[in-house]
Image (cartoon, grey):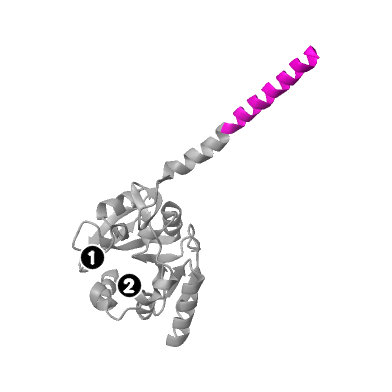
Amino acid sequence: MRHLSVLLFVLLLACCRGASQQQPASTSTTDSTTAVYQFKDASRDGIGKLYQGREIAQVMGHLGASWLERPEREREERTDLLLKALSLKPTDVVADIGAGTGFFTFLMAPKVAKGNVLAVDIQPEMIEYLNEGKAKRKITNVQPVLGTESDPKLAANSIDIAILIDAYHEFSYPREMMGHIAAALKPGGRIVLVEYRAEDPNVPIKELHKLSVAQATKEMKAIGLKLLKNDDRLPQQHIMFFGK
């Protein structure tokens, strides 16, 4: 009996050692994740996930489509000035990331008559809006693209410009998304972030739905992009141009 007890003890010890040797692999995976993102209790308008010290904002879903299409949007945001700031060429291939209902997609389409607008969204309901808008306007150079939270589903070296209007601050996986978008740029391509100015307390937008130039520059630097220009012609938003 004593020998049996000793044998059982040795086997138990071996099992415990085996388990402890496997544990670091799991810890390593966790450490790898937390190296990019941190987590806390979610604030009222956030998801409790932090990137580069910024809490990611909650996504405005398809139920907010009417707000995207509000009649006063052009006057409030001066989308006409934004369109001029982009200096689009007729042959450009543009990716409208977080295209929503296509409000800005369909403004850009005539400017790239010999090119294409890839209207990317992660919500199937928004893709339906885009297809309906495309059919209604009889536009042939708009292509809706259903992406995911971490991948816009754009081919490498395929776009001249990617524009993100009030969308980047809501990305659940900003590092992964921007890495894919950067890889999709042609040589000399640009990424444009249009975000409400966090530096201005008079901009009547919730804090997590704003972004400062300094924060945006820090986050883009993490994927190898640099700030080329910050255009300040809009009344409430930055137009930040980034490139490799």
Q: CA distance from mark 1 to mark 2?
A: 30 Å
Start-end of magenta stretch: 1-23
Amino acid type, label 2? Leu
Pick the front one: 7 or 76: 7
Within 10 Å of disc 2 (Cα), the crowding (few <14, some 14-19, many 20+) is some
Height in image: 14 above or below 63? above
Magenta stretch: helix, strand or loop mostly: helix
**Residue 121 in the image, given as x and y percentages of width and height:** 46, 68
Using residue 78 as the reference point, say whether residue 160 is left or right of it.
Answer: right
Height in image: 199 above or below 20? below
The residue tagged with tag 2: helix, strand or loop?
A: loop
Q: Earlier along the polypeptide chain: callout 1 or callout 2? A: 2
Q: Which residue is mark 1?
A: 204
The residue tagged with tag 1: helix, strand or loop?
A: loop
**Residue 101 in the image, given as x and y percentages of width and height:** 41, 75
Q: Which residue is mark 2?
A: 88
